Image (cartoon, rainbow, N blue to C red):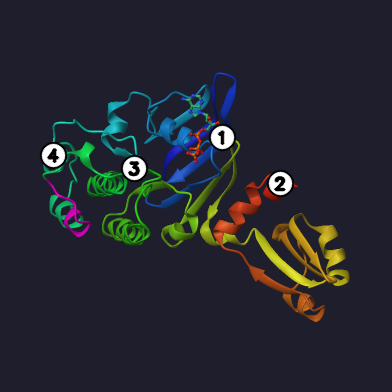
Amino acid sequence: MNIIQCEDLSKSFGRRNALQHVTCAIDAEKIIGIIGRNGAGKSTILNIIAGYIKPTSGSCKVFNENPFNNIQTAANMIFIDDRLSFSDYLSLEEILKFGADFYPNWQSELAYRMLDYAGLDLTAKHQQLSKGQLATFNLVYGLVSRCALTILDEPMNGMDEAIRTDFYRAILKEYLAFPRTILITSHHLQEMESILEEILLIDKGSIIAHAPLDEFKEQLISLSGPSDALADLLSETEVYAQTIVAGMTSAIVDTSKLFVSEDLLRSKGITLSHLTASEVCKYLTSKEGSDIDAIFD
Ligand SMILES: Nc1ncnc2c1ncn2[C@@H]1O[C@H](COP(=O)(O)OP(=O)(O)OP(=O)(O)O)[C@@H](O)[C@H]1O
């Protein structure tokens, strides 16, 4: 069952096109990574899904309704990002009590246990927390609310590596205990990969891939071997990156256009290796001919 349906969705801010003709459907009860470079349009699409901003054109349906200013969809959804703010006068404990009153599936005990684990003082005020502590508190708040749609926009921003590792596990455990749809953005895809079922890759306001994680990773492959043995193959497929050193070529290529068996590759001395999701994202979204070294030449 789709809980989010976007049809030909576009959003402009003045003359800047943040999203362009986006069409996608998101199933219930999945953890989906919304991935893309800085400025790709990730927060914009999440803000439209959350009902905070209106699209310029096209439609977005969440739980079959237009989410903009919609109390019904808001009641089944939580949006966590680093701009989440609570009253300056409330302690963390008081904020948790408000959460318990508002969200029907709220898990108080779990919230206390997680915050105790992270060493947060419940008498502290939200605004007194450090950047990492703030992210930790907000993420706990988002998880224990157990909303059918949980949107986490860069939830680990500012957290140290150890707590990030712990909290990726916490997200997965919470999801397994109470399946829901979790949309999560992060620039640390490698760390987050193990909890994702699907990846939705946005580049310059357009969706360029939306697939289960394994399928996504299989889109590109790395081939290495003698340059003459690889030359014909490379002319038949799309090459995303290539290096040639001493007659040996290494190339990142599109697997959908590569019609050759692994046995044949082996017989030509070509080795094939798989990429991580993070590497696939990097190659699919890098600017043609981009090279930071060129700036200094
Ligand atoms: N309120 C706004 N006013 C003007 N331009 C905006 C506004 N919000 C976003 N944009 C522009 O829209 C584009 C997409 O921004 P968005 O915040 O969605 O990117 P993002 O993928 O979340 O980036 P990041 O990974 O850096 O957070 C960017 O070019 C940004 O400058």
**Element type where label 2 sits in the image:** helix
Lower sequence index among marks 3 and 2 = 3
Mark 1 Cα shell of 10 Å, populated few (<14), some (14-19), many (≥20):
many
**Element type where label 4 sits in the image:** loop
- Counting from the top left corner in percent of width and height, residue 40 is at 55, 38
In three-dimensional space, the C-alpha distance between marks 1 and 4, rounded to whole angstroms, equals 41 Å
Within the magenta stretch, is there residue 120? Answer: yes
Amino acid type indicated by mark 4: Ser
Left or right: 62 in relation to 8: left
In three-dimensional space, the C-alpha distance between marks 2 and 4, rounded to whole angstroms, equals 50 Å
Residues in magenta, as a range: 115-122
- Identified at 39% across, 33% down, the residue is 64
- Counting from the top left corner in percent of width and height, residue 142 is at 27, 45
Principal secondary structure, stretch drawn in magenta: loop
Do the numbered discs 3 and 1 sit on residues whose CB atoms are within 8 Å? no
**Element type where label 1 sits in the image:** strand
Give the residue at mark 2. 296
Mark 4 Cα shell of 10 Å, populated few (<14), some (14-19), many (≥20):
some
Badge count:
4
Give the residue at mark 4. 91
Lower sequence index among marks 1 and 4 = 1
Give the residue at mark 1. 22
- Counting from the top left corner in percent of width and height, residue 206 is at 60, 37
